[in-house]
Image: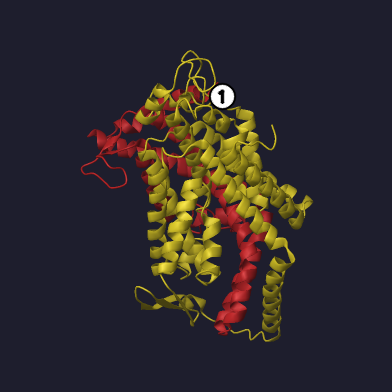
Chain colours: A red, B yellow
């Protein structure tokens, strides 16, 4: 079974929300927002799972970051700028590892996105979204499926993060599972 | 197979590039009877799914254990391991437009993986009063100008060989820097900072006052703003910077990142801490915004130029990175940091020299 067959299998479910609203532009935006929602939720669960597997290692990285962080705050509180700079330089190494691991986690959180774009390519490569006015970055009065999906995805991810950040059971569960490591897609990230 | 997803519709420019290539069965020609491969090009390379996945696992392993270099390895995979680079090169003389279209897709794919992933920085610093808004604006504006300018000037214009050469130069510079870092001079710098940090830590331990200070009220407070100087206090200590420095730094770093398809995030934090002399924890939070802006700008600009992506390949790579990032921390205890660093210095020097020779001079070190 190749990817195209998989995309065709899911096609009826994915295309359905695009028909829930009219005019067509409103339907397109709603369908794309729902598709982005699927990506955000699946990505968040995947990143949580990976963070769970790595919780010990993440805790070690977090400890390194926090240690330097607290030390630098202490230096600032004392007005000792030279020590502060030295601690910061030391902290760069810890930051590098943390940054890189965070990059991996972020990759995990966006893995569904290219598959969603592959499906959109099948459906909308020839049907760009018409705009009321032109924009400097994409010249004409049309938006390619990638651009519209990306903007929808970012918006949905921010909204998701805001909503989930207010749900206490979700935050508690996430903290337990991941050892409180700030993750992409949550208010901690 | 990868590539079939581009059917039925190619962006007009890729379609034109394919149409402009001579038909036939020789290298540098397109055989319409062959099955669609990379980007839906008839006879294009059929990227081996297993190889692509395993390479991505390796990239994920690097991301999660080495603390650098993941993006470079993602680029090496796209250019060398999957056979996309060699395929692009066959069209250098016969169909330069197609050569450049494939090149743009490769660097866009790198950008997608690396730029997106580099977005990670500790956003919780935003909430802790660690975002210097004027700095974020200066850096963000610079990043937009750099990424947009770089992609606009180079999309559809850079041949694969030139791209490979410049990518090699970048990796070589990275390798030289890492090499310097492990040299006595580089270590001396670090040792000095380490000694100062440890001395301060010892002092703090001796003088533990135990008083709790409300740190929430000690965040960033901008005290002066002009075109050439911004002053702010952080924990009551005064910092100042010239906003033109992060602006031009943002232009240069975003331009390099967008041109090569490598992440700019890992360059931004050292830049802000070293050149602009800003606190690391402010630089970390603020740079995330600039990386996000430059990544989105460069990818959207590439797309607007008609560049195509093989989404299936990118998706598969992200899944591989996920697996690699789980495997990485479980195996890292078997490798010492210093040996890992040395291994990557050797790799960086080898890849850098090889790519510079191949790209600019057509000389292969191996093969």
The answer to which of A178 and B14 lies nearer the viewer is B14
**Image check: B261 left or right of A55?**
left
Against B229, is B103 above or below?
above
- How many neighbours does mark 1 have within 10 angstroms: few (below 14), some (14-19), or many (20 or more)? many
- Check disc 1 and report its element: helix, strand or loop: loop
Residue lying furthest right: B334
Q: Position of residue B212 (x, y in %)?
A: 57, 81
- Quarter of the figure with the C terminus of chain B: top right
**Image check: B342 left or right of A75?**
right
Against B309, is B30 above or below?
above
Q: Residue at x 50, y 26 (%)?
A: B3
Q: Look at the image and tell me whether residue B325 can be seen.
A: no
- Quarter of the figure with the N terminus of chain B: top right
Against A129, is B220 above or below?
below
The answer to which of B127 and B52 lies nearer the viewer is B52
Residue lying furthest top: B33
Q: Look at the image and tell me whether residue B187 can be seen.
A: yes
Picture mark count: 1
Q: Residue at x 51, y 59 (%)?
A: A188
Q: Position of residue B118 (x, y in %)?
A: 52, 52
Against A8, is B81 above or below?
below
- Residue position for label 1: B46
Q: Position of residue B55 (x, y in %)?
A: 64, 37
Q: Position of residue A151 (x, y in %)?
A: 37, 46
Residue lying furthest left: A132
The answer to which of B247 and B233 lies nearer the viewer is B247
Q: Chain of mark 1?
A: B
* Location of residue B59 by image quarter: top right
Q: Residue at x 43, y 69 (%)?
A: B132
């Amino acid at each position: 079974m190749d990817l195209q067959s998989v995309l065709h299998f899911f096609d009826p479910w994915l295309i359905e929300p695009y028909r829930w609203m009219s005019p067509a532009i409103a339907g397109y935006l709603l369908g794309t927002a729902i598709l982005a929602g699927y990506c955000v939720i699946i990505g968040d669960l995947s990143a949580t799972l990976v963070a769970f597997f790595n919780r010990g290692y993440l805790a070690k990285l977090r400890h390194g970051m926090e240690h330097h962080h607290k030390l630098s705050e202490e230096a600032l509180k004392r007005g000792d700028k030279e020590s502060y700079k030295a601690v910061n330089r030391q902290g760069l190494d810890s930051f590098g590892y943390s940054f890189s691991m965070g990059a991996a986690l972020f990759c995990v959180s966006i893995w569904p996105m290219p598959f969603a774009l592959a499906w959109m390519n099948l459906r909308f490569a020839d049907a760009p979204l018409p705009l009321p006015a032109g924009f400097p970055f994409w010249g004409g009065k049309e938006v390619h499926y990638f651009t519209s999906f990306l903007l929808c995805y970012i918006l949905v991810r921010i909204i998701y993060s805001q909503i989930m950040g207010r749900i206490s059971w979700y935050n508690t569960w996430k903290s337990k599972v991941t050892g409180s490591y700030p993750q992409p897609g949550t208010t901690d990230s | 197979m990868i590539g079939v997803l581009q059917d039925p519709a190619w962006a007009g420019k890729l379609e034109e590039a394919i149409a402009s290539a001579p038909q036939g069965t020789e290298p540098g020609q397109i055989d319409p009877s062959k099955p669609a491969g990379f980007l839906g090009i008839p006879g294009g390379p059929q990227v081996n799914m297993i190889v692509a996945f395993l390479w991505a696992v390796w990239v994920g392993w690097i991301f999660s254990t080495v603390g650098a270099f993941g993006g470079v390895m993602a680029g090496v995979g796209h250019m060398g391991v999957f056979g996309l680079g060699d395929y692009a090169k066959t069209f250098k003389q016969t169909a330069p437009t197609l050569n450049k279209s494939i090149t743009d897709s490769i660097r866009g794919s790198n950008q997608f993986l690396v730029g997106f992933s580099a977005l990670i920085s500790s956003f919780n610093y935003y909430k802790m009063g660690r975002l210097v808004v004027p700095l974020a604006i200066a850096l963000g504006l610079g990043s937009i100008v750099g990424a947009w300018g770089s992609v606009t000037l180079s999309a559809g214009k850079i041949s694969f060989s030139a791209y490979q050469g410049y990518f090699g130069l970048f990796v070589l510079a990275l390798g030289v820097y890492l090499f310097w870092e492990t040299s006595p001079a580089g270590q001396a710098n670090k040792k000095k900072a380490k000694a100062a940090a440890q001395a301060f830590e010892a002092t703090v331990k001796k003088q533990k006052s135990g008083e709790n200070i409300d740190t929430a009220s000690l965040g960033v407070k901008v005290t002066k703003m002009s075109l050439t100087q911004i002053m702010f206090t952080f924990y009551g200590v005064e910092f100042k910077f010239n906003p033109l420095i992060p602006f031009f730094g943002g232009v240069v770093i975003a331009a390099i990142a967008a041109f090569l398809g490598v992440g700019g995030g890992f360059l931004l934090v050292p830049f802000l801490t070293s050149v602009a002399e800003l606190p690391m924890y402010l630089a970390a939070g603020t740079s995330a915004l600039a990386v996000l802006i430059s990544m989105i700008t460069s990818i959207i600009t590439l797309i607007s130029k008609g560049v195509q992506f093989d989404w299936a390949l990118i998706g598969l790579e992200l899944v591989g990175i996920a697996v690699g990032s789980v495997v990485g921390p479980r195996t890292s205890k078997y490798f010492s940091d210093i040996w890992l660093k040395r291994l990557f210095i050797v790799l960086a020097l080898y890849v850098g020299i090889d790519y510079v020779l191949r790209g600019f001079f057509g000389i292969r070190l191996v093969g």
